[in-house]
Amino acid sequence: MRLGCFTLLCLCCCWFVSGEGETVSCSNVVPLGFRTENISITEFGGVGDGRTLNTKAFREAIYRVQHLPRVGGTLLYVPPGVYLTEPFNLTSHMTLFLAAGAVIMATQDSSNWPLIAPLPSYGRGRELPGGRYMSFMHGDGVQDVVITGENGTIDGQGDAWWNKWRQGSLQFTRPNLVEFVNSRDIIISNVIFKNSPFWNIHPVYSSNVVVRFVTILAPRDSPNTDGIDPDSSSNVCIEDSYISTGDDLVAVKSGWDEYGIAYGLPSSNITIRRVSGSSPFAGIAIGSETSGGVENVLAEHINLYKMGIGIHIKTNSGRGGFIKNITVSHVYMEDARKGIRISGDVGDHPDDKFDPNALPIVKGVTMKNVWGVKVLQAGLIQGVKNSPFTDICLYDINLGGVTGPRTPPWKCSDVSGFAHQVSPWPCSELSSNHQGSCANYS
Ligand SMILES: *[C@@H]1O[C@H](CO)[C@@H](O)[C@H](O)[C@H]1NC(C)=O
Ligand SMILES: *[C@@H]1O[C@H](CO)[C@@H](O)[C@H](O)[C@H]1NC(C)=O
Ligand SMILES: *[C@@H]1O[C@H](CO)[C@@H](O)[C@H](O)[C@H]1NC(C)=O
Ligand SMILES: *[C@@H]1O[C@H](CO)[C@@H](O)[C@H](O)[C@H]1NC(C)=O
Ligand SMILES: *[C@@H]1O[C@H](CO)[C@@H](O)[C@H](O)[C@H]1NC(C)=O
């Protein structure tokens, strides 16, 4: 057994690595306290009949938590029932507790949905210029917030939004289901997220965030329903979750082109562990918005089924930023179009003011113990001309089961690194006998 430690804010966090019978976890980046007070949404007029609009109840209950704070914070209990509501803000030192059978359901009426300013690191809404709809549950500048319970459901009723997107009739960027901006000490656990209008869980400019034991579901054809997107955030722990959506299951981001470069806030220290699921896009993704930089990402024990791409690291010219020190290990994938892709030409631009000479740096990507069956194409590693991807290190990879017409199993350009025990054998750009600086990453 090895013991790993890091210190942050005078807080020592230790975790046990590969000890027998112990489960490795990063969840202690946020200590879980006990709430000294328990109030119920019904005390504020909440009615769980699926029809009554509970906006006033949620906003008043949370106003009460904010303005009459208790030492240790307050738990807001949502009993079984279906509570329809418009979006609301969360506040510090609160737990939103969804009992078994509790559903907090978003209204589909976008005409009353508040607009908020775009994120400075994006310069505009992600889909459309201008502002964006606030997320269904929103936290701005908050700390010590827990969303948990007995696997109750947060239902975004996204189909109305998806249809508007398909018809091209949206005026602004669709809302996330849950977003935390400039926040810290956040725990999201034992909740089911369903049918988000857009991304599901979006911590941005935040630190010390734990997401575990969650289930995130959206139809395979639902547009942009990413599962969890840590964005310019650090010390994020994602564990023990099942995610099946219409877009990337987990995507680590950090802002968009000239806006992200100017904002300059990286995503760092991100752990993704024991996550499984299915998607027509990527399982574990980094990017494509990485202009503030992404570093120190560990993804391990990942199980993927019916995938577009198992692992996808994506950036583009004009993005700038960096992607450094990424480790992905113990991945099993079954039925995927592509196993591994690291690409330097993916993702759109916010506007025509991006600097085409802002080239991203991709350095130090280790993938090991990756096992795939029914993988159509093993890998694509295509760096940026004049900014080749370096220290791309592949160990113990078997991506088999290609039955159809042979495309070349691997395709590489503008890349260097090392490969050891990789089958089918990757491209000649990766050395088989000089480990080089890959030794520093394994
Ligand atoms: C909070 O109070 C409700 C009754 O309003 C009770 O059913 C529930 O068990 C309590 N929850 C916790 C976590 O104490
Ligand atoms: C939510 O909080 C933001 C500030 O963070 C504020 O501008 C907005 O009016 C609040 N919205 C609602 C619906 O309370
Ligand atoms: C809730 O879901 C999680 C993750 O699927 C599971 O581990 C846990 O046992 C469930 N809890 C309850 C109370 O059903
Ligand atoms: C990330 O973790 C390292 C040690 O593992 C620590 O030194 C660093 O401060 C952390 N970064 C942030 C932004 O907290
Ligand atoms: C690289 O990332 C890992 C997490 O995957 C972290 O433990 C390690 O300290 C990082 N290395 C450096 C040099 O920051």
Image (cartoon, rainbow, N blue to C red):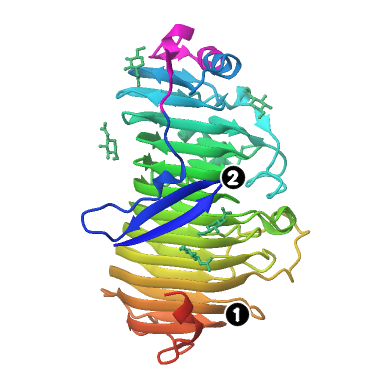
Left or right position of 242 against 354: left
Determine if residue 196 is in view.
no
**View extreme (bottom): residue:** 433
Ligand 5 within 8 angstroms of badge 1 C-beta? no
Query: Does label 1 or label 2 sit earlier along the sequence?
Result: 2
On the image, the x and y values in percent for residue 412 come to 49, 81
- In the image, residue 5 above or below residue 428: above
> Which amino acid, mark 2?
Val
The quarter of the image holding the C terminus is bottom left
Secondary structure at numbered mark 2: strand
* Marking on residue 120: none
Tell me if mark 1 has few (under 14), some (14-19) or many (20+) residues whose alpha carbon lies within 10 angstroms of its own: some
Mark 1–mark 2 CB contact (< 8 Å): no
Residue designated by label 2: 204
Q: Which residue sits at x=55%, y=25%?
A: 87
Residue designated by label 1: 388
Q: Which residue sits at x=32%, y=18%?
A: 80
In which of the image's four quarters is ligand 1 placed?
Answer: top left
Determine if residue 303 is in view.
yes
**View extreme (left): residue:** 21
Q: Nearer the viewer, residue 287 or 206?
A: 206
Q: Nearer the viewer, residue 179 or 304?
A: 179
Residue 122 lies in the magenta-colored region: no
Q: Nearer the viewer, residue 46 or 336?
A: 46
Secondary structure at numbered mark 1: loop
The quarter of the image holding the N terminus is bottom left
The number of numbered badges drawn on the structure is: 2
Residue 53 lies in the magenta-colored region: yes
On the image, the x and y values in percent for residue 81 come to 35, 17
On the image, the x and y values in percent for residue 426 come to 40, 83
Residue range (magenta):
34-60
